Image (cartoon, helix red, strand yellow):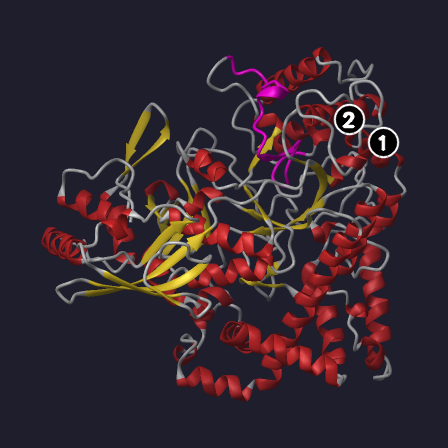
Amino acid sequence: MAAAPGGTGTTPLSRLAALHGVATSYSPSPDRTVAASDGAVVTALAALDVDASTPEAVDAALAARERQLGERLLPPTVVCWGDGPALAALAALPEGTRLRIETEQGELRSTVEKLPPGVHALRATTPDGRTAEAHLVVAPRRLPAPPGRTYGLLVQLYSLLSRRSWGMGDLGDLAELTAWAGRALGAGFVQVNPLHAAVPGAPTDPSPYRPSSRRYPDPVHLRVEDIPEYPYAVGAGDRLPTLLERAGRLRESVLSKGELIDREAVWELKRQALEVVHAAPLGPGRRAAYCDFLAEEGEALEDHATWCALAEVYGSDWHRWPPGLRDPRSADTARARAELMDRVDFHTRLAWLTDAQLGTAQRSARDAGMPIGLVHDLAVGVHPGGADAWAQQEYFAAGMSIGAPPDAFNSGGQDWGLPPWRPDRLAESGYAPYRRLLRALLRHAGALRIDHVMGLFRLWWVPQGRPPTEGTYVRYDADAMLAILVLEASRAGALVIGEDLGTVEPGVRETLDDRGVLGTSVLWFERDWEGTGRPLPPERWRANCLATATTHDLPPTASRLTGDHVELRHGLGLLPRPLEEERAEAAADTGEWLALLARLGLLNGSHGGISADAEEAEIQAVHRFLLRTPARMIGLWLPDTIGDRRPQNLPGTWDQYPNWRLPIADGEARPVTLEDLAASPRLHALVDVLRGRAGSGDVEGEGGEAEGV
């Protein structure tokens, strides 16, 4: 394991921490280093089963770790990139050591040369009879570049309602969106929010970034009417027609009455409908397909469905269940699973149906000509009380939560309430849970976005009950994490996009780029930070990235251009300085960008102002600018196409703002359906810009014209 930041240290505690990848200091800025508290270091070590509670315990643990590393022939996981030379770990073995490699494909080899990609079993035997076993990860040297240059749509699926959805966007809407965007708009991809399974119950956490399970999608996204058994369940009394009528009222409450998206209400209706559909028998072919899915998913799906069934009885936090049920492998859990087998089968069936509709959406995208199709989003962690944390307890660090240290943007740091994976347990397993997770997400994806991709290198661990300022970084084996990511993505023929916004330690972006992982570049953050501080000209943007004007955590472009985002934060009491100062800074920031757009001839005759036409012209100019960059992928935030001013998420708020519950709306906050979007002249005018059809300013420039659009 790599040494922690800040060097090996001089005290026994700092040396012990370094040997376990626990940092004793961090740098919030290049010119400043802050020491982590001894309490944070000791607690992080305890979460790794290392006792550092007393000086005597530190000395004993340090001696034990140094002895273990000195006697170890191989680390638990060894990485080999492509057809590269033998690794240092193998080169350090005693001369004459014999290797025995059993590949994933069942072949036996005695050398690491020309091994097929995969995670193989490695056994080394030294001349004096000592042996060691390790997982050997063989991955391609890098992922291939995107197929040409393309643009696509970015959308939070729940916010995209159609006239057929049940109060929130669903997988039927997603399939319709991809078919339309590919065929009518020439888009190359559609990026969605994480569709992971949420923690059930009231009130449900609406954030898609704090799920119960990252491996299985949430059945709330199902289009009930598209399930093949649905027609055969319609005759079951009057329940389905009644539920459809109630779903219509729920949809209209959002679209016509200005109410928020109510995920709990949608799920309650869908759950009842799915109970009726579940009672309809599967035909022989469908039954065989279902059995194949069960066999393929195995214990992981059984665990997930068991947690869902137990949560219906005991609540959605497994820490509060009867003691015997807190262990997924206990006899009590086995008995409870047998007693609840009907409910377990219900939840496994929902996982199968949701997976199938995800597959339909991706096929719809590819059939429409999209070279990439769906871009799924992998959240950085899971809810501590959810299914993954219950089923995979041995892989999570007990008593810890991940977040971010204090920095220039948040002096108090951040605690995201997500338990971190243990790097030692991951390595010992050959990264098995990580591999399975990636494989599941990539099954129906043309690309995968990794939220907070810096977490492949290190994560800020916060002891539960302590403020984020009292945390410390814990390092992961980034070489192994990246090798697994590149291996699984290459097998799926998918791209990987890393969300690398904010504070990034030196070397991370370069390492990701070297492995073919694309970065994320957002217009308002692209400035010459090491020089003038002014907006970065398009030719200086990086090519291997997804370039966008905004994200789900930032103000929509119309809000940024008008300064509405400052007024919103002022109304919620979130401004750290007087309103006038914030207004002036925001106006100056926007003014610099508009001046650059004008100098480049991209404003197409607009001179600014507050009219709808001027605002629309400025938004078009922003996207003309993105075309001027060399970015391989350009993302269009779907709410920007109709002038929506409301962010989907306002960081730093919980109940002050309706995060993750807003439908896509126009500039007057009137909800807009998928059907309305398809007919919007404003949307088509902006898309024409990205397709190079809007006249002056739409020249190839440094980046060239988007291909396939």
First in residue order: circle 1 vs circle 2? 2
- In front here: 113 or 130? 113
Residue 204 seen from this side: no
Q: Residue at x 83, y 84 (%)?
A: 236
Residue 451 seen from this side: yes
Question: What is the x, y in percent for residue 659?
Answer: 64, 47
270 displayed left or right of 393: right
Question: What is the x, y in percent for residue 168?
Answer: 75, 56
Name which residue type carries label 1: Ala
Name which residue type carries label 2: Gln
Question: What is the x, y in percent for residue 290?
Answer: 66, 78
Tell whether position 356 is magenta.
Answer: no
Q: Report the disc number at residue 685.
A: 1
Write down the region rendered in magenta: 532-555
Q: Is residue 318 above or below residue 288?
A: above
The residue pinned by badge 2 equals: 620
Secondary structure at numbered mark 2: helix
Q: Residue at x 44, y 46 (%)?
A: 455
196 displayed left or right of 370: left
